[in-house]
Amino acid sequence: MPHRRPIVVAAIALSALCAGCATLVDAGPDMVPVHSSPEGARVSLDGVPVGVTPCTVAMDRKGEGLFAFELEGHKTTLLDREKVLHGWIFGNIVFGWLAPAGVVADLATSSQGKYSTDPIDVTLEPGRPSDRVTVAPH
């Protein structure tokens, strides 16, 4: 069976080529510190409760990035955190002949973009929780 060894080695090498640079180096999630003034606001990400301020939120790259902050006596505050291009995707270009497989892997795992890990600081406005206000990310 020594003649099968090159096939096994080639199969392992080929599987390694199918992974993208951003997926291999930094697949996420992106950890984002979240604060509100006043503190104690319930935080939801994409409609799922994730904590109470202050907290750190793990942002799955497949998510939409829509935060909601709710605190009794204050308007519900919405913030949409946009993705930024992940720098490691350019590793696929550096290894040009690997680029097609690497880009496909990064796109399939949503690793072509990532969320900024800059802190989110939101000031809540007094009012009814049923009133909503959208704030721009800092």
Image: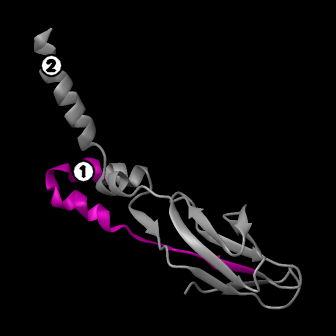
Q: Secondary structure at mark 2?
A: helix
The residues colored magenta run 77-102
Q: Residue pushed farthest top?
A: 1
The residue shown at (31%, 68%) is 87
- Is residue 74 shown left or right of residue 29? right
Pick the front one: 97 or 38 = 38
Per the image, the residue denoted by label 2 is 5
Q: Residue at x 42, y 55 (%)?
A: 27
Q: Earlier in the sequence, mark 2 or mark 1?
A: 2
Q: Are marks 2 and 1 in contact (CB under 8 Å)?
A: no
Q: Position of residue 92 (x, y in %)?
A: 23, 57
Q: Please say whether residue 80 is one of the residues in the magenta stretch.
A: yes
List x then y, in percent, for residue 73.
Answer: 89, 85
**Toward which corner of the image does residue 25 lie, by quadrant?**
bottom left
Identify the amino acid type marked 2: Arg
Residue 119 among those drawn in magenta: no
- The image quadrant of residue 39 is bottom right
Q: Which residue is located at x 31 percent, y 46 percent?
A: 19
Q: Which residue is mark 1?
A: 100
Between 103 and 19, the residue placed more toward the observer is 19
Crowding near the residue tagged with mark 2, few <14, some 14–19, many ≥20 C-alpha atoms within 10 Å: few
> In the image, is residue 127 above or below residue 66?
below
